[in-house]
């Protein structure tokens, strides 16, 4: 059974930093692209960042380029998202998703990031 468990969210000050983690199990993690997606209140899902199976290729939503960094540790079956210089518009539920942004792979239950001013 595929499982994706996100953690690390919380209440963060404007301009602050948080690191999200997603622990994967039930599939060959190192064979898959992984994507972080988010859903802000009242809005649809949007992909934020993706990473190739061995980390050699990454991509970012323009709004987060230069502020967010995606990485992975295949030995730990974990993908990370470092969020720096947080803005109020970054407030959302963040999910990790198996596969590339264009796919509809399984997602975890999400972790909430709330940016406070």
Image (cartoon, rainbow, N blue to C red):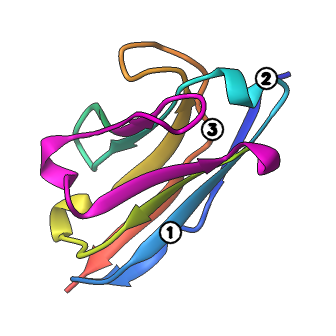
In this image, 113 relative to 87: left or right? right
Residue 49, x across and y down, in percent: 36, 41
> Which mark's residue is nearer the viewer, 2 or 1?
2
In this image, 95 relative to 64: left or right? right
Query: Which circle marks residue 63 in the picture?
Result: none
Q: Quadrant of residue 77?
A: top right
Label 2: element kind: loop
Q: If the image is split into quadrants, where does the C terminus sit?
A: bottom left
Q: Residue at x 25, y 72 (%)?
A: 86
Q: Is tag 2's residue or tag 1's residue first in the polypeptide sequence?
A: 1
Q: Quadrant of residue 48?
A: top left
Label 1: element kind: strand
In this image, 39 relative to 70: left or right? left
How far is the residue under mark 2 from the one under mark 1?
Answer: 24 Å
> Which mark's residue is nearer the viewer, 3 or 1?
1
Query: Which circle marks residue 19 in the picture?
Result: 1
Question: Furthest-top residue in view?
Answer: 103
Between residues 116 and 47, which one lies in front from this camera angle?
Answer: 47
Residue 88 magenta:
no
How far is the residue under mark 2 from the one under mark 3?
Answer: 16 Å
Mark 2 — residue? 28
């Amino acid at each position: 059974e595929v499982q994706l468990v996100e953690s690390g969210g919380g209440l963060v000050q404007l301009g602050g930093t948080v690191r999200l983690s997603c622990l994967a199990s039930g599939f060959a993690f190192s064979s898959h692209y992984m994507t972080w997606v988010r859903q802000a209140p009242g809005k649809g899902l949007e992909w934020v960042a993706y990473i190739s199976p061995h980390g050699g290729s990454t991509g970012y939503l323009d709004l987060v380029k230069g502020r967010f960094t995606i990485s992975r540790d295949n030995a730990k079956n974990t993908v990370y998202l470092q969020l720096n210089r947080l803005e109020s518009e970054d407030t959302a539920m963040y999910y990790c998703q198996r596969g590339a942004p264009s796919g509809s792979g399984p997602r975890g239950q999400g972790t909430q990031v709330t940016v406070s001013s």
